[in-house]
Every structure is written in structure tokens, then in C-alpha cells.
Amino acid sequence: MEDLYRLKLTGITYNQIESGVYALILEEEQSGRRLPIIIGYPEAQAIECKLQEIVTPRPLTHDLMVSVFDTFGISLKSVVIRKLPNGVFAADLTLQNEETIRTVDARSSDAVALAIRVGAPIYTTSEVLDEASYLPEEKQTEERTRPSSTPSRRRPGNTPPPAPEKLSDMPDSMLAQLMQKAVEEENYEEAAKIKSEIERRKE
């Protein structure tokens, strides 16, 4: 079985390039590496509502799902973030009732929205971290300056960095996610710009 690394949600940042696009920031607990996942406004709103403990007049979709789980005796045991061949992130939900355990495919944003509502752990693989994560600048500074015997210390209240403002500054994984989202929304002009940047890097 492949080793899994636990992630925690550190926040959501707004993407300056494309309106209505946000980056969900997950941080690996031991190394501090951060995994950005592109999500849309509805998904960002669903996650922020829970983070800010906003009570809505009627249940949101993910709150409804949690109610359904509770009604039928189903518990969400864990979420595993994985990366598809096209560069887009997905997730496996491990669900359990009294009789069986099942794994269900889900969008990564839906998986995180459910996990934070029930307190389920979120994991990913070393492959995903190696391909798509980054080390924040303050972490890189700590790594360079502290003695090897000194444990790493995280600054309290540390907020996630803003999403890159230029396509040229984005990691390949983020470009792939933006490309997928632009195509799904039939924003072909934006998709063409992103494709040009991807092809430029391959030259």
C-alpha cells in the first residue's frame, strides 16, 4: 500500500487571472509543502461557509450529503487526493457503514467540503506532492537558516500566499487545472492562452 501524507486546509486564495477562479490551499503537516487546487466560486463558497461557520437558511449541497450519511448510518472515514493523467485533481472518499466499506470517486473540492464538515482526515500521495506541491518562501528561508538540530517552527496565523497573477508564474499542475476549467466553461479564448503557455514550456 502506498504511503499517504496527511494534509490540512490552510485557506482559499483568489486567482487574479480569471474571474471566479480560486485556489484551495492544502498543507502537508510534516514538511509544510502546499498543494494548490483550482476550484470555482460555488465550491469556494461551500468551503468558506463551513470555515466561517456561516449558517444558511436551507442546507447547502454538502450539508445535505452529511445529513444523508447520518440518516443511513454512513461515515466518511477519509479522503485521498489524487491526480488524473490530464493534470486535474480528483479524490477517493472512503465510506463505511455497519456492513461494508466502499471507495467513491469525487471531485477534490467536494471531497474537501465534506471532510471539513465531518472532521475526516485528508491525505495525498508522495507522487502528488512531488509533482504539484511547493514550499512557501518563509519555509525555504527557515530551511536555509536554521541549524539541522533545531526543529521547524511555523509562524502562528500564517496565511496562504496569493495565487500567482501571471500564467508564466504558475506551476504546470495549476495550468492544467485552469485549462480544464476553461474548456468546461467553453471559455476557449482563455483556454488558448493557457495552451500557448503550456506549449512554450515544452519547447
Image (cartoon, rainbow, N blue to C red):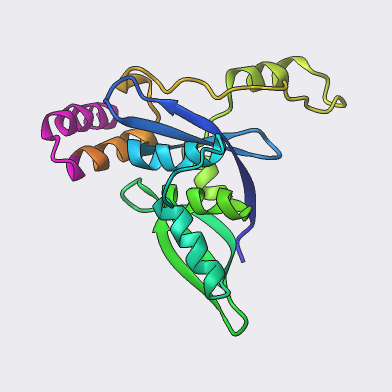
Q: Is residue 161 above or below residue 102?
A: above
- Whether residue 27 appears in magenta in the rendering, the answer is no
Residue 108 drawn above or below residue 191: below
Q: Is residue 84 left or right of residue 185?
A: right
Vertical side of 153 occupied by 126: above or below: below
Query: Which residue occupies the foreground of this view, 79 or 30?
Result: 79
Viewer-nearest residue: 57 or 201: 57
> Residue 186 magenta-drawn?
yes
| Residue 194 seen in the current view | yes
In which quadrant of the rendered image does the N terminus lie?
bottom right
16 left or right, relative to 55: left
Q: Position of residue 112 (x, y in %)?
A: 50, 49
Confirm whether residue 125 shows in the render. no
The magenta-colored residue range is 183-203
Q: Residue at x 64, y 57 (%)?
A: 3
* Residue 164 position within the rendered picture, expressed as x and y whole percent measured from the top left: 40, 20
Q: Residue drawn at (53%, 72%), measured in percent from left and top?
A: 71
